[in-house]
Image (cartoon, helix red, strand yellow):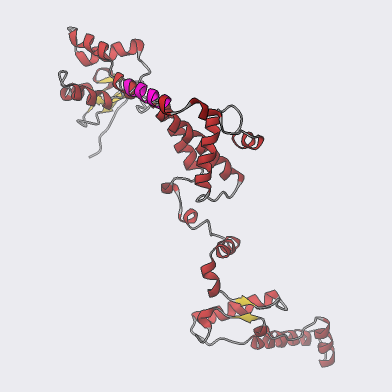
Amino acid sequence: MTITIKENQKQCVCCGKVKSTKINFYQSDSKDHFDSLVPYCKACLKKGLDESNEKSVHETLSKIDKPFVQDVWDKAVDSNKETLGTYLSSLNIKHKDWSYFDGEMFREIKQELVEAVSEATPVQNQSTFDVTDSIYDKWGFGYQPEEYRLFEHKYKKLEKSYSEKTALHTEGILNYIRYQVKAEMASAQGDIKAAKEWGQLASKAAQDAKLNVSQLSKSDISGGVDVLSQLFDAVETEVGILPLLPQVMEQPYDDADLIIWAIINYYRRLEDKPQIAYRDIWNFYDEMLGEHFETQGFDDSQIEEYKSKRNNVFRDLEQVYKEPLYEGDE
């Protein structure tokens, strides 16, 4: 059944009913609420709220991304008006931009974390990292020595498992590291809001740099092997596959002839036909060349002369070429 939602209407995510936005939904400044309205209707919020139960209060405020401020809540409860609506209206006066994680409970946790970090981090260790010109060139100016140290530490951890293909890949991973380190530092200092914002930037940078496994395509996971040159690059980095490939003992007389011979035998294997010697291919070319000269009106002596000029001499490529192991007697 399709539900029609008209202008100035909204569907509650709790009861599923479509109601007028004018009187049935609270206004919201949360970044998560794209239409500036709380996704729960007033009736559902009031129904699920037990004003005397602190857990119930926090559950309701977390749904609508609003902070808990004790003195504001107490005044709303003591008023003769509807508690939740009065509380939200009062929040807009001084705490309009606060999210749920800016509430008093989290502010106490932040302060405890800041004090713990300050006690555990000796001041003298914060400026021991030597910031060289190469570090400035890599990360840019404006950061603290400790931040540069953390940038480099994380970069060394990631570079072992992340292949930087182009300058854009490199810039992407550097941006990710900057934002992620900032998020971790903000979290350690108890600044939840800043940590969330830096974390969002890091997540976006990770997607751009394809650091997120969920964003990797089959081509990414395989190392991007989608053209022949990339296949060669992949093969050269995998020692285990080399013994299975054809081997050239010395420089062949003609690279093109060698490739054609290998391709012909490959297709013959697919058709379960016996392999042919290179002499058979060379003889075919020689006959075709002779027929071509005959159509030009040349006699036998002229044909031999032109073949000689073309350096059309036989060289047995079997002396320089070895088939893969699976084609041998073993």
Q: Position of residue 272 (x, y in %)?
A: 48, 84
Front residue of 286/168: it is 168
- 164 left or right of 194? right
Front residue of 56/117: it is 117
Q: What residue do we see at 25% from left, 35% from top?
A: 3
Q: What residue do we see at 35% from left, 14% from top?
A: 95
132 up-or-down from 70: above or below: below
Q: What residue do we see at 81% from left, 92% from top?
A: 300
Q: Position of residue 248 (x, y in %)?
A: 64, 76
Q: Position of residue 65 (x, y in %)?
A: 31, 24
213 up-or-down from 152: above or below: below
Q: What residue do we see at 58% from left, 43% from top?
A: 170
Front residue of 226/176: it is 176
Residue 298 visible at all:
no
137 up-or-down from 284: above or below: above
- Specify the quadrant of the image occupied by residue 288: bottom right
- 289 left or right of 5? right
- 4 left or right of 198? left
Magenta stretch, main secondary structure class: helix
- Specify the quadrant of the image occupied by residue 113: top left
Residue farthest along the bottom direction in this orientation: 300
Q: Magenta stretch? A: 108-118
8 up-or-down from 302: above or below: above
Q: Position of residue 249 (x, y in %)?
A: 66, 78
Front residue of 236/37: it is 236
